[in-house]
Amino acid sequence: MFGLARKLAKEGVLGLNERNAQLIMRLNPRHLYPRVDDKSITKRLALDAGLAVPELYGLIRHQGEVRDFQNIVAGRDSFVIKPAGGSGGDGIIVITGRSKRKRDNFRLANGLLITRDELEHHISNVVGGQYSLSGNPDIAMVEYCVQFDPLFSYRVLQH
């Protein structure tokens, strides 16, 4: 593990704490933090600037909208659910497929199956603020699941 960290550092990759201290906190005015603390705002700003970002399938802002989840993912086999105000990856669920026998069962990135009811319960927790930085109500984002090229990843780790 530490060998990999040293390799990455040698190539100029910053650790999370160093990135925060040397770049984010030092170079960004505090009043602009909400633009990056809320991923839905960050996504809108990136789109407005013409940047390529994963497609946003839908936002779930209130408990009453959790039932809209089924419509948001209709016809989609893979997607990501994430809290707009989360931190450190907490609350992110990556769906990589659906069960062939029961389309309301979704396959997690680790291969396990989860039901639609379980996903909606998770979304309800996201909206309730369980994963937000402040503990306040949050927004659940449902977006395209980026597909990584395993050959590219292998090459990066070999150098």
Image (cartoon, helix red, strand yellow):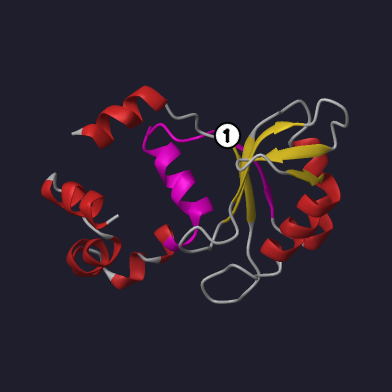
The residue carrying pointer 1 sits among few (fewer than 14), some (14 to 19) or many (20 or more) residues within 10 Å by Cα, namely some
Seen as rendered, the residue at the extreme right is 102
Camera-side residue of 106 and 81: 106
- Residue 28 is situated, as x and y percent measured from the top left of the image, at 25, 64
Q: Which residues are magenta?
A: 37-60
Please give the name of the residue rendered at 62% of the width and 75% of the height, measured from the top-left corner. Answer: 136
Q: Residue at x 76, y 25 (%)?
A: 75
Name the residue nearer the viewer: 105 or 121: 105
Q: Which residue is mark 1?
A: 144
In screen coordinates, is 110 left or right of 107? left
Q: Is residue 75 left or right of residue 137?
A: right
Q: Residue at x 59, y 76 (%)?
A: 135
- Tell me the element at label 1: loop
Verify whether residue 50 appears in magenta: yes
Q: Residue furthest left?
A: 10
- Give the quadrant of the C terminus: top left
Q: How many marks?
A: 1
- Quarter assignment of residue 116: top right
Q: Nearer the viewer, residue 36 or 15?
A: 15
- Against 99, is 68 above or below? below
Residue 30 percent across, percent down from the top left? 31, 72
Which kind of residue does numbered mark 1 sit on?
A: Tyr
Q: Position of residue 153 (x, y in %)?
A: 34, 31
